[in-house]
Amino acid sequence: MASRGGALALVALCWLELVLHGAAAPLVPAVYVFGDSMVDVGNNNYIQKCKVDCRADYPHFGVDYPGQAPTGRFSNGYNLADQLAQLLGFAESPPPFLSLPNGSLIPQMSSGINFASGGSGIRDITGNGPVCEQVLSMSEQVGNFTNLVRQWTSENKTAADLVSNSLFFVSAGSNDLFEYVDHIQVPNNQNDTEFLRVLVASYSNHLKDLYGAGAKRFSVLSPSLVGCCPSQRLIAQKSKDVDQYGCLGAGNNLSRQLYPMLASMLHDLSLQMPGMNYSLVDSIRMAEFIFNNTHTPAYNFTVLDRACCGSGKFGAEDGCDFSADLCENRDNYLFWDDYHPSNAATKVAANVIFGDPGIFVHPINVQQLVQPRSQQSI
C-alpha cells in the first residue's frame, strides 16, 4: 500500500500529465539557461578542445529530435531546457550562445539564450581538466550573460525590465559530485562537508552575480541521485558500494547532503536580495518516487538501470555513438546514455518543475514563479 505522501505524489503526476500543455503565448519575455549537459543544447559543439565524450553532435544522439539529427543535446530528443521552454510557450530552448554571430547576440537576448555547457559544474575547474579538457565554466557562462546585459541595457531602456521579468533556469552540481567521487581535481584535505560547503558558497556567488545583472526569477534544478546513472551503477558493482536502489552509495549520499544546503542557501538569498523569487526542484525525491513507482498514467519506465544507447553492462561499458546498441522502446527507458535521462524522463521532470503542487518543487513551481509579481505568494 502506498504511503499518504506517495499517494499524493501519484495523484499529482497523473494530474500534471492530464492538464499541462504549452502556453498559447510565452509566459515570460525570455528564458536564460545556465549549467550542464542536462540543459546544454549545443554550446560544446563549438568548443574546439572539448573532448568527444563531452559533446553530443554525432549519432545516435538526436535520433528522436525533429529531423533525427544530432544537435548537441545529450538526449535522444528534446532535453529538459527544451521541454520547460515549451511549457512556457516557446518552441524549444533558446539557441546556444556559441552558435550566435556577434551581431545577433543582443537581438537574441530579447527572447533568451542558452549558455549551458555539458561537463561544467559549479566549480570553475569542473570539466576543465581530464574529463572534458575544455568547457564553459559557470563563471564564464554568467560572465557571458552579464557582459551582454551591460551592453544591451546601455542601448535599450526597456532591457532591464525585460530581464527582471524573464526566467533563469539553472542546472548545476552533478558534475562536481561525479568528479569528487572519482577523486578528480579534489584537494586532498577536503572532506565531504567542506567540499559541499565550498560548492554551495560558489553557487551562491553565481546567483548573486546573475541577480546583480538584473535576474529576479530563478528555477533551480538540484542534482538528482547521481549514483544511479548507469555509469555509476557500473562503478558501484566494481567497488561493492551499492545502495538500496543498486546505485553508487557514495554519489547518492553526496546528493542527499547537498539538497538541504541548496534549499537553505536559496532561502537566505531570497531574504537578502529584494525582489528575488525562486523555485527549487527536489530531484532526489522525484527520482525516489519513480524508482518506487515505475508505472503511472504519466509514464511507464520498465528499464531503470540500463542506458538505451550504449553497450556492455548497464549499457555503460562503451559510450553512445553510431556503433552503440540502441534500444527500440526508448520511452520505457529512464536513461538515454550512461549519464543522461531519456527524452521521456525529462518530459516528466519538466511537467513537475512547471506545475507540481508542492510535493517535489518548493516553495512555488515555475508556473507560479512566472506570474505577475502582484499575484505571487510564497
Image (tube, helix red, strand yellow):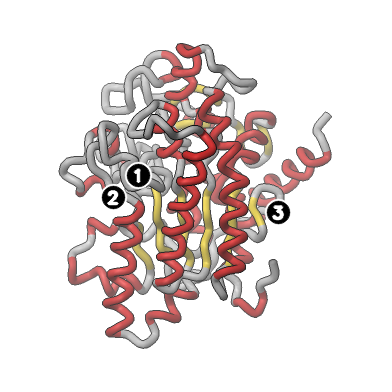
CA gap between label 1 and label 2 equals 6 Å
In the image, 315 versus 47, the foreground residue is 47
Query: Residue at position x 20%, y 49% from top?
Result: 46
Residue tagged 1:
120
**Mark positioned earlier in the residue sequence (1 or 2):** 1
Which residue, given by chain and number where applicable, does mark 2 sit on?
A: 136
Mark 1 or mark 3: which comes first in sequence?
A: 1
State the residue lying farthest toward the bottom.
157
Mark 3: which secondary structure? loop
Q: Is residue 215 left or right of residue 146?
A: right
The answer to whether mark 1 and mark 2 are in CB contact below 8 A is yes
> For this view, does 121 lie left or right of residue 365?
left
Find disc 3 in the rendering and name its residue: 358
Q: State whether residue 345 appears in this view.
A: no
From this viewpoint, is residue 173 visible? yes
Callout 3 amino acid = Gly
* Residue 4 locus on image (x, y percent): 83, 40
Q: Amino acid at mark 2?
A: Leu
Q: Are marks 3 and 2 in contact (CB under 8 Å)?
A: no
Q: Which residue is found at the position 56% from the left and 63% from the top?
A: 269
Amino acid carrying label 1: it is Ser
Number of other residues with Cα within 10 Å of mark 1, as a class: few under 14, some 14 to 19, many 20 or more: many
- Compute the Cα span from label 3 to label 2: 33 Å
Quarter of the picture holding the C terminus: bottom right
* Residue 178 in picture, x, y percent from top left: 42, 32
Foreground of the two, 117 or 272: 272
Mark 2 nearby-residue class (10 Å; few <14, some 14–19, many ≥20): many
Q: Residue at x 56, y 74 (%)?
A: 275
Q: Nearer the viewer, mark 3 or mark 2?
A: 2
Q: Mark 3 and mark 1 in contact (Cβ < 8 Å)?
A: no
Q: Is residue 119 above or below residue 213?
A: above
Quadrant for the N terminus in the image: top right
